[in-house]
């Protein structure tokens, strides 16, 4: 198992960089600006009749929004996840936690992810890096991640670019499909495949579906670039230049939605990656998404001293404008 203290330091680095540096993707956009929803001057509807409720993983949501996975694994992040979860419960959104690898290695960090007590009704998603299935993790560790937070599903996140440019990266993604299939067969909850900001293609989504993945989160390019995050963590110019070369890499979010929907017309589909407004969410739904995920807009308010109230203040206008 990895040294949890090293992982904890990396978690704090990621928060510091995301909040303090320009880590937006460069030269690539999520694609929402290319789509225009039709304006109707005579809508013939009462706004009070608009219904944004939906069902995800058997639970009702007031809005089709996921607070995407961000953090956990360092003691100071417990407060962040609690604020996010309280806001998600209040607004009727789903929520994912950050990678639980640290807490699998050191159970004393489990509390930094455990938010079910403040969010008893929402869909809550556990999270591990798919590549860890090639580094000693298996069904047992996946079940521990799910049980740790009383999750409704497990995200296996795919971040080959981030791992490739990360100083401590795990880069062996070879042969993962058979390991993913084993997890999908053994786990008592659905498995969600999620990229981290470079997109999932239709072809890759189909391969994942065929081994048992039940939900796809495209997490396309155009929002936060994790190669840019790692660029700011490098201590050498060489490493920073290599990471920086990929700031515009990936499949734009809207293109990823279209590709996945073309090959998998009925699978639950989450659109994340550069989702910054309720209008973006509405466009994602029209393009075929089931939910839309957003992360970075909620991070800064989550560390505000007002906690969940600050998160609600940011996310409520987004939720009100998505219908």
Image: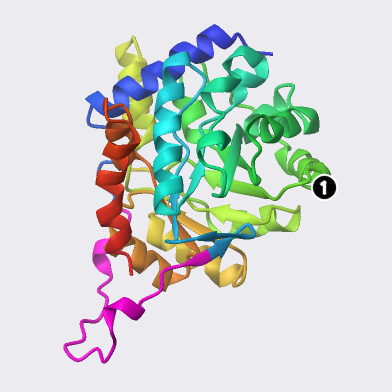
Q: Is residue 73 magenta?
A: no
Residue range in magenta is 30-54
197, above or below 140, in the image: below
Task: Name the residue located 49 percent from the left edge and 25 percent from the top edge.
Answer: 72
**Nearer the observer, 248 or 217:** 217
| Any part of residue 67 in sight | no
Classify residue 65 by image quadrant: bottom left
Classify residue 175 by image quadrant: top right
Q: Is residue 282 left or right of residue 62?
A: left
| Any part of residue 323 in sight | yes
Q: Is residue 202 left or right of residue 286?
A: right
Q: Is residue 36 magenta?
A: yes
**Label 1 crowding class (10 Å Cα cut-off): few <14, some 14-19, many 20+?**
some
Q: Is residue 176 left or right of residue 245?
A: right
Magenta span: predominant SS is loop
Specify the color scheme.
Answer: rainbow
307, above or below 68, in the image: above
Q: Which of the image's four quarters has the N terminus?
A: top right
**Nearer the observer, 11 or 241:** 11
The residue most toward the left is 41
Classify residue 21 by image quadrant: top left
Residue 120 image point, x, y percent = 57, 43
* SS at mark 1 in the image: helix
Q: Which of the image's four quarters has the C terminus?
A: bottom left
Task: Name the residue located 68 percent from the left edge and 36 percent from the top edge.
Answer: 146
**Nearer the observer, 264 or 147:** 147
The residue to which callout 1 is attached is: 185
Task: Name the residue located 61 percent from the left edge and 19 percent from the top edge.
Answer: 103
Residue 118 image point, x, y percent = 50, 36
119, above or below 251, in the image: above
């Amino acid at each position: 198992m990895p040294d949890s203290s090293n992982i904890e330091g990396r978690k704090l680095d990621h928060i510091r960089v995301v909040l303090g540096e320009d880590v937006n993707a460069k030269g690539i956009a999520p694609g929402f600006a290319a789509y225009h929803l039709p304006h109707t001057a005579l809508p013939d509807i009462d706004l009070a009749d608009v219904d944004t409720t939906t069902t995800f993983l058997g639970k009702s949501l007031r809005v089709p929004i996921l607070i995407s996975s961000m953090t956990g694994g360092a003691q100071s992040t417990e407060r962040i996840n609690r604020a996010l979860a309280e806001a998600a419960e209040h607004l009727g959104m789903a929520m994912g936690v950050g990678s639980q690898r640290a807490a699998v290695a050191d159970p004393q960090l489990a509390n930094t992810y455990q938010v079910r007590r403040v969010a008893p009704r929402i869909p809550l998603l556990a999270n591990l890096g798919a590549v860890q299935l090639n580094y000693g993790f298996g069904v047992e560790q996946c079940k521990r991640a799910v049980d740790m937070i009383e999750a409704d599903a497990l995200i296996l996140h795919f971040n080959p670019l981030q791992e490739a440019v990360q100083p401590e990266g795990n880069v062996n993604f070879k042969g993962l499909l058979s390991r993913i299939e084993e997890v999908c067969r053994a786990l008592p909850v659905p498995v969600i495949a999620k990229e981290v900001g470079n997109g999932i293609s239709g072809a890759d989504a189909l391969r994942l579906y065929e081994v048992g993945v039940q939900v796809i989160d495209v997490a396309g390019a155009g929002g936060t670039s994790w190669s840019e995050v790692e660029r700011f963590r490098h201590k050498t110019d060489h490493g920073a230049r290599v990471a920086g070369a990929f700031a515009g890499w990936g499949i734009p979010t809207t293109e990823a939605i279209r590709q996945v929907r073309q090959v998998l017309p009925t699978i639950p589909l989450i659109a994340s990656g550069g989702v910054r407004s309720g209008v973006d969410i509405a466009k994602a739904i029209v393009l075929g998404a089931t939910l839309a995920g957003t992360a970075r807009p909620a991070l800064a308010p989550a560390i505000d001293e007002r906690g969940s109230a600050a998160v609600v203040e940011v996310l409520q206008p987004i939720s009100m404008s998505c219908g």
